[in-house]
């Protein structure tokens, strides 16, 4: 096949959670096989190379010969991780059709979906979500604990045991530290950048608004999925009033 030529095993994109470094094991292989035959390479690493190159025929031939579609390298990364990083949805589809696990974690805890999100490969994101991939991080997640916003609320502190919908599917009454609050939940699908930006804008505006006719912003969940905005809950409001306030801080009617 076409791939039976001299190879260079350098993966251009790393794990979304890996520290900046080169893949030493692959660099070593590059030196050993730069002028050699790709058939001399371990089938698992060869699969990762072919995934990196987008060689669909080579991948299928290798899998048909018995290569493990879920092979993990020294960093516990798979060919699906590679395809996700490179934005190769056709390669990802082929791997999934041949039994690739959709959510394998590498040594840093990153999954193919997390890698696809990191590199903004939206077609791969949609494909992985379609196959049941789960989100590990919210789009506003920060790596350094010192960067976590002061308003961050631990979602474990929100009690939805006796939760009541304020408006269908979005706003709910919950209990937070013994107090009733209104919670707006942002869906778990983060591939829609417009929705993410709308959430950011609403969050930013609610932090700025200080007005007696606007509910008080109490905090938000931004470091885990699903993301949420938490405000005070005024039981005398109708659902329409609550919705109007929670939507970008719209002023509510006066309460008698």
Image (tube, helix red, strand yellow):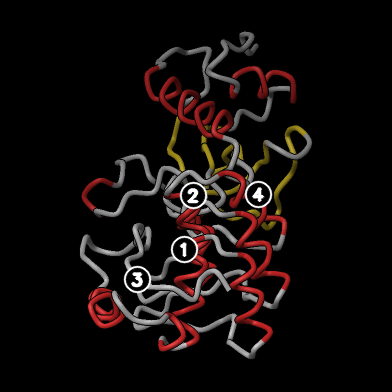
Q: In the rendered view of the protein, which quadrant contains the C terminus?
A: top right
**Mark 2 or mark 1, whichever is nearer to me:** 1
Q: Quadrant of residue 40?
A: bottom left
Establish if 185 lies above or below 7: above
Instruction: Return the mark for residue 117.
Output: 2
**Mark 4 or mark 3, whichever is nearer to me:** 3
Q: CA distance from mark 4 to mark 3?
A: 28 Å
In the picture of the structure, the residue carrying the numbered disc 3 is 9
- Give the mark nearer the N terminus: 2 vs 1: 1
Residue 159 shows up from this direction: yes
Q: In the rendered view of the protein, which quadrant contains the N terminus?
A: bottom right
Q: Give the class, few, some or many, for how many residues have Cα within 10 Å of label 4's Cα (few <14, many ≥20).
A: some
* Residue 95 % position (x, y): 64, 70
* Residue 48 % position (x, y): 47, 73
Say which element carries label 3: loop
Q: CA distance from mark 1 to mark 3?
A: 9 Å
In the picture of the structure, the residue carrying the numbered disc 1 is 52
Q: CA distance from mark 2 to mark 1?
A: 17 Å
* Residue at the image point whose x is 68% and y is 69% from the top: 96
Asked if labels 3 and 1 touch by Cβ distance under 8 angstroms, the answer is no
Instruction: Return the mark for residue 126.
Output: 4
């Amino acid at each position: 096949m076409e791939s039976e030529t001299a190879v260079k095993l350098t993966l251009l994109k790393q794990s979304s959670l890996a520290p900046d470094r080169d893949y030493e094991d692959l660099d070593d292989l590059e030196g050993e096989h730069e002028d050699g035959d790709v058939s001399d390479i371990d089938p698992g690493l060869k699969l990762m190379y072919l995934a990196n190159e987008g060689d669909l025929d080579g991948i299928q031939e290798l899998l048909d010969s018995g290569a493990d579609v879920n092979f993990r390298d020294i960093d516990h990364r798979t060919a699906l991780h590679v395809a996700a990083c490179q934005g190769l949805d056709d390669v990802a589809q082929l791997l999934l059709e041949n039994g690739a696990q959709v959510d394998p974690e590498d040594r840093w805890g990153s999954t193919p979906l997390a890698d696809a999100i990191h590199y903004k490969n939206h077609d791969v994101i949609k494909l992985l979500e379609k196959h049941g991939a789960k989100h590990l991080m919210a789009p506003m997640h920060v790596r350094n604990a010192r960067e976590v916003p002061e308003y961050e609320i631990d979602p474990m502190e929100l009690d939805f045991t006796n939760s009541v919908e304020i408006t269908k599917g979005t706003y709910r009454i919950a209990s937070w530290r013994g107090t009733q609050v209104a919670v707006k939940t942002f869906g778990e699908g983060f591939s829609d950048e417009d929705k993410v930006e709308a959430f950011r804008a609403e969050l930013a505006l609610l932090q700025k608004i200080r007005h007696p006719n606007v509910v008080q912003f109490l905090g938000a969940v931004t470091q885990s999925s699903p993301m949420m905005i938490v405000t005070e809950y005024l039981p005398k409001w109708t659902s329409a009033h609550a919705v109007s306030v929670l939507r970008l801080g719209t002023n509510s009617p006066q309460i008698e």
